[in-house]
Image: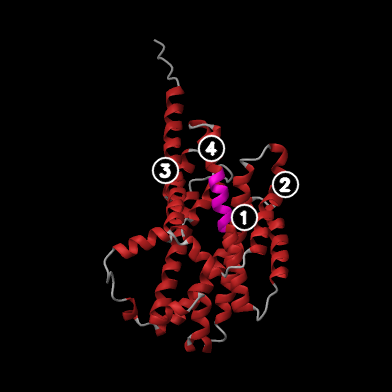
Amino acid sequence: LLLIYLWVMKQNPNSTFVDIMSSVFCKTFAKIVMFVLFIYFLIKTFLMMKSTFNFFTKVIYDELNWIFYLISTLFFMYFALHKSFKIYGRVGEIIFWVVFISINIVLLITSFTMDLTNLLPLFNNGIEPIASTGVRCAYIFGDYTVIIVMMGNINYTNQTSTKIIGYAFLAMNTVINIFIVFLCNFGYTTVNQSLAISDLSLYIDLAVSVSRLEWFGVFAWTITLVTQLVIYAHCTKFSLEALLPKKLVKISPHIVLIPLAIAFCFSTLSLHVLINNFLTYPWGIAAIIVQAGIPILLLIASTVQQRRLKNNVRIPSKIS
């Protein structure tokens, strides 16, 4: 699905997501799609706010007043939403290697205590439980959808796709390694641990003995959470701006932050209970429709648009 987005970007380097969808379908249909994306990214942003708060209260601070966290986070997001998405790209190129190296240092040292037999048995109950769980948990995935914001808004070059694929491969490989090392170290007690990176560095003797290694993980994970939070907030703002009249585009950051603030204030559920409410078949199917259906529609729209352009090109006849 990431490759579909990249292929469309390569074919239409100067066209935004909304431009392509509107030109082939219609503006009304494009607005419906953007409304769906707005709700999708808004929920993602809210869950990231809760995840960040949960991380701070369990790992960094003994006590953290939720009002102080909410106010400071909203101010930070308000500032970030007034910046161009290209700035996130510049910052990302700088901090990616800091986060990548820090996390992999933690994984490397904690891998010495791994027990690979904890990965077994594989497919003990067949593929059906894995497939059904994959559907229910589909909402957790789909981070590649943020590329929708990039379409037509970045300087696309021949190296753009290569860089994005390279970064994506390194990130996915790291995430897989996190869970392999996590499971191999904790075994049956894995389900009792809530924060993979910090738990690895806090509860493994070898990791703790290497000069307070846990701060590598804490530092890297903090950067990751905050960055992901503002990117999802920006995606929410981008989706909303496609729905608003031009006169109201300037106040889009306010419109994004208000429901987030209200939801955070009135959400009495813990992060664990809240996420479990989203890990259901209806939410999973809805997530699959957004994550897989939209890029397929985009691919169809881009193909139709390219054919139209070819048909409109007139080949001059030879002059004898």
Left or right: residue 285 versus residue 21 is left
Quadrant housing residue 274: bottom right
Q: Which residue occupies 48% across, 73% down?
A: 104
Identify which residue, 281 or 117, lies in the foreground.
281
Earlier sequence position, callout 4 versus callout 2: 4
- Give the CA distance from mark 1 to mark 3: 24 Å
Q: Is residue 240 above or below residue 69?
A: above
Dot 3 surroundings within 10 Å: few (below 14), some, or many (20 or more)? some
Dot 4 surroundings within 10 Å: few (below 14), some, or many (20 or more)? many
Amino acid type at circle 1 is Ala
- Give the CA distance from mark 1 to mark 2: 14 Å
Q: Circle 1 sits on which residue?
A: 233
Asked whether disc 1 touches disc 4, contact meaning CB atoms under 8 Å apart, the reply is no
- Give the CA distance from mark 4 to mark 3: 14 Å
Q: Circle 3 sits on which residue?
A: 296
Where does the magenta region start and end?
35-44
Q: Circle 2 sits on which residue?
A: 251
Identify which residue, 171 or 241, lies in the foreground.
241
Q: Is residue 62 above or below residue 285?
A: below
Q: Which residue occupies 46% across, 31% down?
A: 305
Secondary element under disc 1, as helix, strand or loop, is helix
